[in-house]
Amino acid sequence: MITKIKPTATLPLINKENPARQRGAALIAAIFVITALAALGALMTQMLVLGSEETIDEWYSSQALYAAESGVDWAIWDLTVNGGAGVSTNSTVQSGQVWVTTTVNTLTINGSNNVYTITSTGTAGGTPGNPRTQRQIVVQYMP
């Protein structure tokens, strides 16, 4: 005949003989889950904020590049069609957002051929003196 031996040790959270000892176990688990979800939410919020900042910086960078390209186009037009010097200082491209500055250096070859080195700097965001983003393009142009 086989006799059953009753175990003498039990797990502290699983006590069927005395259910009063199990009180609070669900509360501890709930607090742990809430804390973990709050930490996950904070992490996701931080990632969203950083992603938004990167997107804004990228947008300002592209605006500054477009402004610099526009400055080169304007300088070439001013040199060839308008008969000007192609130089501008903090010209406003988009009011309160984007500015462009162009400088032109002229090199005369063989006494009659001019080669223009156009440097155009586009800035976006902030102020002309303290921009958020700045892009510069240097182009050599010979009409």
Image (spheres, helix red, strand yellow):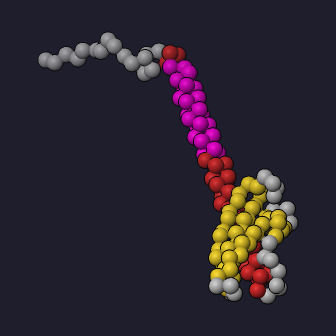
Q: Is residue 48 above or below residue 21?
A: below
Q: Residue at x 79, y 88 (%)?
A: 81
- The image quarter in which residue 3 lies: top left
Percent x, y of residue 8: 32, 11
* Quadrant position of the N terminus in the picture: top left
Q: Decide which of 103, 111 is in the foreground and name it.
A: 111
Residue 127 located within the stretch drawn in magenta: no
Percent x, y of residue 97: 81, 62
Residue extending furthest left?
Answer: 1
Query: In the rendered view, does 15 fall on the left or right side of 84?
Result: left
Percent x, y of residue 141: 66, 80
Q: Is residue 2 above or below residue 54?
A: above
* Quadrant position of the C terminus in the picture: bottom right
Q: Decide which of 54, 140 is in the foreground and name it.
A: 140
Residue 29 located within the stretch drawn in magenta: yes
Q: Residue at x 47, y 15 (%)?
A: 18
Read off the magenta span: 22-46
State the predominant SS element of the stretch in magenta: helix
- The image quarter in which residue 2 lies: top left
Q: Residue at x 73, y 65 (%)?
A: 122
Residue extending furthest front?
Answer: 111
Residue 30 in view in this figure: no
Q: Residue at x 64, y 82 (%)?
A: 109
